[in-house]
Amino acid sequence: NALNAFAVPGGYVFVFTGMIMNLEREEELAGVLAHELAHVTQRHVAARLERAQYLTLGSLLVAVAGVALGGPAGGAAAVSAAGASQSAMLNYSRMDESEADNLGLQYLVAAGYPPSGMVGGFKVLRHKNWMSGINIPTYLSTHPAIGDRVNGLQARIETLPASVRNRTFDNRRYQRVKTLLWARYGDEQAALQRFSGRDGLSRMGRGIVLARQNRVNDAAAAFEEALAAAPADPLVLREAGAFHYRKGSMDRAEKLLSEAMRRDPRDFMASFFYARMLDETGRHAQAARHYADVLRHVPQDPEVHEAYARSLGTAGRTPEAYIHMTYSALYANNRKLTERYFNQAKALAAKMADQRAFRRLEAAYKERKEIWEKS
């Protein structure tokens, strides 16, 4: 839940869910991302590492882990990262920040977002800082002088054409993402207060939180209210269907999930829960088709591979089941389980009429094994 985002060598940008949950609009998140991408394109992280030759890869990784952990454990990890690094990869100079602001604003505008998003996100972070006393958001501790930079960015935005300054953006999709994050991972009491509205999304979010608290009857009532308020919303249909699947109400789950899939054919989570529902009701051949379709779109999801493997095992397709159990362990980065399942898949591969599935698994296994051995 930390308000944090940062760039690391190699061009990767990490964004904490807390950043998404606490920013108000999509262009504000885009502004933070544009700023971090500018740090990447200008090689700010790499340049600082080159100047800090004594910073080893080990201390770098521990420092990143320390920032990610937060709290006493994170502090201990960061200190153990040979404090001599002085957060070389995370703390930027004012010159770096100014350059990232200027380029980030260009990236944001070129991507079609309102330029106000560049300052809007920083204003939210600054407000959180004022409201939180000494526990400042992590992002502010590694990106100094937010106030001065907001003023500079606002002055630059005033020089842009009116057609750019006055852009608007549809934030409905972002609000749906925020709803799911708060419902699934936010503090339960804070989330329930947030979901006090009578619209479909608020009722849906409330239902998810109540289900987390194991208040099943209250959750069921909240989902019914959500469906009454938004009967055609595929997200509400999907989450209500998933809830009823977990509750064991398979007939209700089937109706809701099939309607969600009809309204949004690209909702692969709905398809995943629909496949699981088919499995639970003994329709393994139909379930297999849905699992295979989901994996075409999210091929590295360990949970989908595991569910598909169990379905195949129940249907007596043991060699294929072990192939997908191997994928599940591999994509979960569990080396011991991956090796065990791979050996079982290898022993059974000769029984398969088509060897291509095993050969694809073998190639993926060898590639991951090389990474494990090097690390």
Image (tube, grey):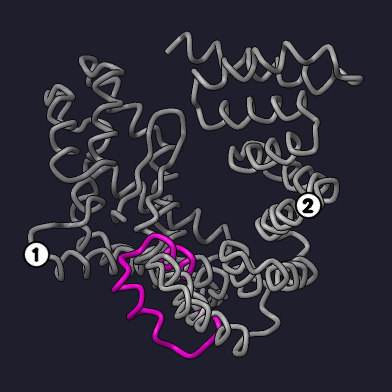
Q: In which quarter of the image is the C terminus?
A: top left
Count of marks placed on residues: 2
Residues shaded magenta? 178-201
The residue pinned by badge 1 equals 133
The numbered disc on residue 282 is 2
Amino acid at circle 2: Gly
Residue 33 on image: x %, y %: 44, 52
Q: Is residue 179 magenta?
A: yes
Outermost residue, left side:
134
- Taking the image as shown, residue 96 lies to the left or right of residue 79, namely right
Q: Where is residue 170 in the image (x, y as percent from the top left)?
A: 57, 75
The quarter of the image holding the N terminus is bottom left
Toward which corner of the image does residue 277 lie, by quadrant? bottom right
For this view, does 368 lie left or right of residue 73? Answer: right
Report the front residue among 300 and 151.
Answer: 300
Q: Against 184, is 56 above or below?
A: above
Q: In the image, residue 32 lies at what x, y percent?
A: 39, 55
Q: How crowded is mark 2: few (under 14 residues within 10 Å), some or many (20 or more)?
A: some
